[in-house]
Image (cartoon, rainbow, N blue to C red):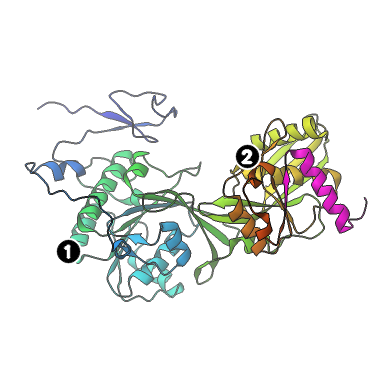
Amino acid sequence: MAKKREVYICGECGYETPKWLGRCPSCGTWNSFTAVSPLGGESSALSRSRAQAAKPAPVSPITADAGADEIRYRTGMPELDRVLGGGLVKGSVLLIGGEPGIGKSTLLLQICQKLGEDEKVLYVSGEESAAQLQMRARRLHVDAGGLFVLASGDLDTVLATITAERPKAVVIDSIQTMMLSAVGSSAGSVAQVRECAAALTAAAKESGIPVILVGHVTKEGSIAGPRTLEHMVDAVFQFEGEQNHAYRMLRAVKNRYGATNELAVFEMKETGLKEVPNPSAMLLSERPEGVSGSCVVCVLEGSRPILAEVQALVTKSALASPRRMSTGFDHNRMSLLLAVLEKRAGYTFSALDAYVNVVGGLWLDEPASDLPIALALTSALRDRPIPQGMLAIGEVGLAGEVRSVIRLEDRVREAERLGFTHCLVPASSLKGMDTSRYSIRITGVKDVVSALRAVAAAEKSAGAPER
């Protein structure tokens, strides 16, 4: 009998090689290869479905279906349905990742409560016993009669149960705790995660039962396991938030049935997660008045414009190399803005410590947040507050110019809805825009200097005291 050779698989991207490598040639990660035994032709989760003689399959035209909305299940949470793209699609496979204790299981139990009102829903846990899940469900007041629990990490048993029970939906908590007997490695290994996900995906597509997978995350915050896992599923969601804060954010990283980068905000309470339908008002609810270094920005999270507060603090440095720190904003981008303000606007930050913070746990990676952060830094340096009803939108270039942003009118409408009175926008974005339709004052600025002049003029008209 021929001896089976081991193969080495990269834990980040799934790249295979017959020998160990220190650095993956595909993704560039170091020390990511683990040895696994190759699967036989009859053992692989995907190979089993191909073992039968191939036969022609019927084909269907790709035409619009008038009843497309009927293939989605509503979760009972409008915010969650919006992130999903309108609901939970039949036969889809979803992957939800997040830090331990962030509230993934709590969210899924609340989803199961709505789905289990009229049909059977199966919650499979490889981490908690049935009694522990029942205790959690009682605390969350989850009393759906159709919610059934299976505490098992044996995926062969889980697949047999799905076939026998035919539930409306299945939750797997978590994919790293599942094991297939045909795969000769421990739970959580690259081979187990890949083959278990392949088997569950095949079962979901064949039966039309949606499957929600919970995924562990690494120290860097990415989903643990091979990168192929994220390619196999239909949608990937990140559940974010600080454990010492009450707010949680569900972000769509990948979604075949909806828009990516959509964001839903929840508030963690004793009885579970509560939706926050107006995140802009929530993020601005504790904004202080008359404080320097504070500015409001409007960013796009998927299809939704959200207003957020950015804060800056500038102090004299006692170090030879001043500190530059940012929370919720790219550190390199912050350094770029400081350099632009020094070169193009004449402000000196070289001997000062500078700090930037985005309130509420948001991460701003959109270029439209450049201008408000630049204004917040100059406000902190001058120790003069930006007028309370003003916000700014725009990308800042190396020449100090303010560049246009997408969907400006949606951003302006959101600012108008929340009662803001003055908005600084890129002058190039005003072409073809009817500003008379808005009650909010809209000022176009060409560069950082003109934006600072507009702020100074607004301060003067508001009667801001000299300092």
Q: Is residue 32 visible?
A: yes
Q: Residue at x 37, y 61 (%)?
A: 128
Viewer-proximal residue among 168 and 194: 168
- Image side of residue 256 versus residue 455, left or right: left
Q: Earlier in the sequence, mark 1 or mark 2?
A: 1
- Tell me whether the residue at label 1 lies in contact with that at label 2, contact meaning CB atoms closer than 8 angstroms: no
Task: List the residue tagged with mark 1.
Answer: 164
Q: Please say if 34 is above or below 73.
A: above
Task: List the residue tagged with mark 2.
Answer: 330
Q: Residue at x 17, y 64 (%)?
A: 164
Q: Nearer the viewer, mark 1 or mark 2?
A: 2
Question: Label 2 neighbourhood size at 10 Å, few (<14), some (14-19), many (20+)?
Answer: some
Residue type at mark 1 is Ala
Residue 153, which numbered label? none
Question: Label 1 neighbourhood size at 10 Å, few (<14), some (14-19), many (20+)?
Answer: few
Q: Please say if 109 is above or below 344.
A: below
- Image side of residue 82 versus residue 410, left or right: left
Horizontal and vertical percent position of residue 185: 27, 40
Q: Callout 1: helix, strand or loop?
A: helix
Residue type at mark 2 is Asp
Q: Please say if 458 is above or below 276.
A: above
Distance of mark 1 from mark 2, alpha carbons?
51 Å
Horizontal and vertical percent position of residue 250: 49, 56
The magenta segment is: 442-467
Horizontal and vertical percent position of residue 45: 20, 44
Q: Residue at x 45, y 60 (%)?
A: 82
**Residue lying farthest right?**
466
- Image side of residue 60 versus residue 242, left or right: left
Q: Is residue 446 magenta?
A: yes
Viewer-proximal residue among 142 and 259: 259
Q: Quadrant of residue 110?
A: bottom left
